[in-house]
Image (cartoon, rainbow, N blue to C red):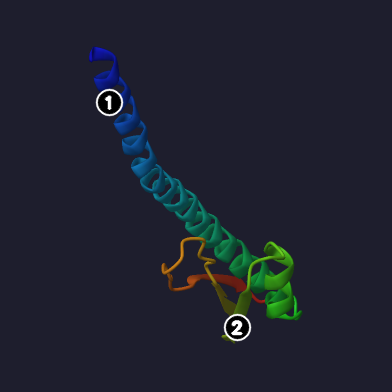
Amino acid sequence: MAHSGSRRDRGQAALEYLGFVPILILVALAGVQIGLIAYTAQQAGTAARAGARAASLDDSAQEGCARAVSDWLSVSCSAAEGADEVTVTATVTIPSIVPGWNFDPARKTATMPLDH
């Protein structure tokens, strides 16, 4: 009888581990998502600086932004020119890998002096 009780205990332990697997997967996906958010914010800053530099040289801010980020990210830039400087705001869409989690886009701004 001692053997049959221990077999049932082993089966129950396997079921308990099986129930814990989805939680582990969700935690892993959340960790990857946090990394993706940080990467996207970094890319938005890079895009804003590149767009501002391009606009300060009388080039297209949007093209400068697009060249600076990874191809798989969606970026848009808007430039506002002042008397001596140009300010570019880059907006990068944060991709979601966890179903149901949606995020506001990452926005970063950079200002560069105009190169006259």
* Nearest the eye: 84 or 50: 50
Determine crowd level at label 2: few under 14, some 14-19, many 20+ residues with C-alpha closer than 10 A. many
Q: Is residue 71 above or below residue 78?
A: above
Q: Which residue is mark 2?
A: 79
> Looking at the rendering, in which quadrant would you find the N terminus?
top left
Determine crowd level at label 1: few under 14, some 14-19, many 20+ residues with C-alpha closer than 10 A. few
Does 2 sit left or right of 71 as displayed?
left
Q: Is residue 83 above or below residue 35?
A: below
Could you tell me if residue 96 is visible in this image?
Answer: yes
Q: Residue furthest front?
A: 1
Q: Residue at x 36, y 47 (%)?
A: 23
Q: Is residue 95 above or below residue 32?
A: below
The numbered disc on residue 39 is none
Structural distance between the alpha carbons of marks 1 and 2: 66 Å
Q: Secondary structure at mark 2?
A: strand
x, y percent for residue 89? 54, 76
* Nearest the eye: 55 or 31: 31
Q: Looking at the picture, which amino acid does disc 2 mark?
A: Ala
Q: Residue furthest top?
A: 2
The numbered disc on residue 9 is 1
Q: Residue at x 74, y 76 (%)?
A: 63
Could you tell me if residue 115 is visible in this image?
Answer: no
Q: Residue at x 54, y 66 (%)?
A: 95
Q: Looking at the picture, which amino acid does disc 1 mark?
A: Asp
Q: Secondary structure at mark 1?
A: helix
Q: Quadrant of residue 54?
A: bottom right
x, y percent for residue 13? 31, 30
x, y percent for residue 15? 34, 37
Give the mark nearest the N terminus, 1 or 2.
Answer: 1
Does 49 sit left or right of 16 as displayed?
right
Q: Residue at x 34, y 43 (%)?
A: 19
Asked if the residues shown at circle 1 and circle 2 are in contact, with their CB atoms under 8 angstroms apart, the answer is: no
